Amino acid sequence: MAAPIQHDPHGFKRRGVLFVLSSPSGAGKSTIARKLLASEPELSMSVSYTTRPPREGEVDGKDYHFVDLEKFREMVSNHEFLEWAHVFGQRYGTPKNDVFHVLSEGRDILFDIDWQGAQQLYQLAGGDVVRVFVLPPSMAELRQRLERRATDSQEIIDARMARAEAEVSHWDGYDYVLVNDDVEECFDCVKTILAAERLKRSRQTGIIGFIRKLRT
């Protein structure tokens, strides 16, 4: 694993990054997201609202905010989501106020969303959004990974594969595209992307004062 990257050596105030990780189910995105959260103290996971029931071990308010369909529709009507999507019969949405509060404090937020959510987020938050798409080495390998999980029926695996084909077709809507044939190498690439994006001049709001001092 690569050594930690010093992303802010001068401590300039900056805007946070809305860091999107997308991939077909089984391509390794969740593993990379967990490793990224464990290694980056300034990065937090966006906690979505969902209409699906909690799975074993999931905690309301930590993994998701679990709500019924009526509540979710009410939040959509009140424009409380940055983005929302209908996935496998359930709805998922990103709360707007929570995100912008964290962003204004110079902290970064990780999003585990699909291409539709990434597109909606980019339309609303523009330059604050960094979109990374993770590809499997091949579709055959992707199917094998889903089958090795042994958590889904063959019918569900077939549905996930069909969805994966559709998701891959939107690869060109992302800023970065990586192939996850080695999870450690892919993770190092993701960390490098995050470090570079944090250093972008457009996010370094505190550098203006430093420049002024240099010129006086």
Image (cartoon, rainbow, N blue to C red):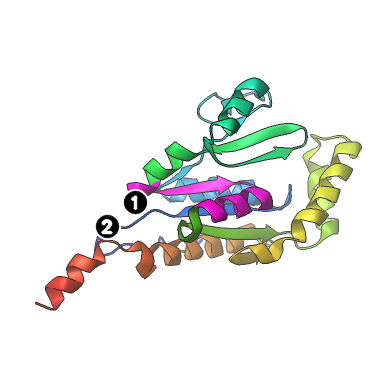
Q: Is residue 68 visible?
A: no
The numbered mark at residue 106 is 1
The numbered mark at residue 13 is 2
Crowding near the residue tagged with mark 1, few <14, some 14–19, many ≥20 C-alpha atoms within 10 Å: some
| Residue 193 x/y as whole percent | 50, 65
* Three-letter residue code for mark 2: Lys
Towards the viewer: 95 or 197: 95
* Three-letter residue code for mark 1: Gly
Left or right of 51, for residue 208? left
Residue 111 painted magenta: yes
* Lower sequence index among marks 2 and 1: 2
At a point 69% along the width and 53% down the height, the residue shown is 23
At a point 34% along the width and 48% down the height, the residue shown is 104
Quarter where residue 100 is shown: top left
How far apart are the two marked residues, 2 and 1, measured between alpha carbons? 7 Å
At a point 77% along the width and 40% down the height, the residue shown is 149
Towards the viewer: 76 or 91: 76
Q: Which residue lies furthest to the left in this view?
A: 216
Left or right of 66, for residue 171? right
Q: What element carries label 2?
A: loop
At a point 59% along the width and 60% down the height, the residue shown is 132
| Residue 191 x/y as whole percent | 49, 60
Q: What element carries label 1?
A: loop
| Residue 139 x/y as whole percent | 83, 58
Quarter of the image for the C terminus: give it. Answer: bottom left
200 lies above or below 72? below
Q: Are marks 2 and 1 in contact (CB under 8 Å)?
A: yes
Quarter where residue 17 is shown: bottom left
Q: Tell me where the magenta segment starts and ends, as one range.
A: 103-124
Crowding near the residue tagged with mark 2, few <14, some 14–19, many ≥20 C-alpha atoms within 10 Å: some
